[in-house]
Image (cartoon, grey):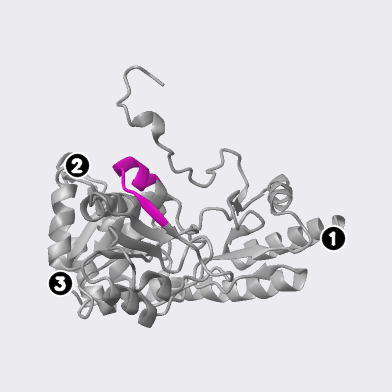
Amino acid sequence: MSRFWSQHVAGLAPYVPGEQPKINNLLKLNTNEHPYGPSPRALEAIRAGAEDALRLYPDPEATALRKAVAQFYGVEAGQVLPGNGSDEVLAHVFNALFRHPGKALLMPDITYSFYKTYCKLYDIPVKLVPLADDFSIRAQDYIGLAEKPAGIIFANPNAPTGLALELEEIELIAKANPDVAVVVDEAYVDFGAQTAITLMSRCPNIVVIHTLSKSRALAGMRVGYAVASQEIIEGLIRVKDSFNSYPLDRLAIAAAVASFEDHDYFVESTRKVVSAREDLTQQLETIGFEVLPSKSNFVFVRHPDHDATELAAGLRSHGILVRHFNAPRISQYLRITVGTREDCARLCNTLSELTEKTS
């Protein structure tokens, strides 16, 4: 520990992202990036924006993006808060909505691991709620609580499982906890689940988090946003403007707005990923893998006869990266991003060879 650090720094447990390889020609199926790239209109907006105006600060409120998101979902622009990736938006959510002394934040025991990192950073107590044996979130576990929580957060579809709650279950959770924020992280919702934004008129405590890194293929631009009641958004803006008044640059705003305007490309590219996911699931099951029913752009799989750590290492030796979490309950699972059909064929051929060799 450095003598220059603030006291809390040594106790932090930073989030560890998926490997970003420095080796050429690796097939990256480990970080859930989109295999088909962003909208051509988004790329053109980036090129058009690379001009003299970059010497000027961007719009601190990202007004054009707030309006584009609001129009897409049928809400008011004042219900939208853009940020530098959904992780930054989540950081503001934890800071603004979950810091209630003496109360614990509820979250699934298996979910996006950054949530625990933020709890440590902001000194928020956590109560982990175990997933069911089939890795599903049980709505009843968040209803009729003996103690009022600081808030509730879960990913839907959940990560890394890919399983999704129905809207009726999310509504039950929100209505059972009307005085706290229920945050639904919908990073993967466009690949087969339903957005909880439609519940906000009946459940004003719901906060939905989205990213443009997945279904809109703009991971390199770092754009995310929250949709919530104007009351909640006001609190998030107070925190945002106490941290960074200009979180989105001009190019990111331009690309994001263009992506929302190119609806046909969005629909077609997500459809291709969903179709490839269904084919990949069938191919993996043919090889002998157990595959959870995914509503995301990845699959969560295990092979009953082969160790997940060894399979991940074997894939890497063949130039294919997947994600392995050495964590309780899921240490024998691999999370595999859905790539192009060619990517999926290469993956399955390699896995078939690896499992046959050790059988």
Question: Which x, y percent locates residue 69?
Answer: 24, 68
Q: Secondary structure at mark 3?
A: loop
Q: Does residue 181 sit above or below 115 in this rendering?
A: below
Looking at the rendered image, the quarter that the N terminus falls into is top left
Q: Earlier in the sequence, mark 3 or mark 2?
A: 3
Q: Which residue is mark 1?
A: 356
Measured Cα–Cα span from mark 3 to mark 2: 24 Å
Amino acid found under the numbered disc labelled 1: Glu
Which residue extends farthest top? 3
- Contact between marks 3 and 1 (CB within 8 A): the answer is no
Magenta highlight range: 117-127
Amino acid found under the numbered disc labelled 2: Phe
Residue at left offset 31%, top offset 57%: 224
Which quadrant of the structure image shows residue 55?
top left
Which quadrant of the structure image shows residue 106?
bottom left
Q: Which residue is mark 3?
A: 76
Which residue extends farthest bottom? 168
Q: Does residue 312 sit above or below 137 in this rendering?
A: above
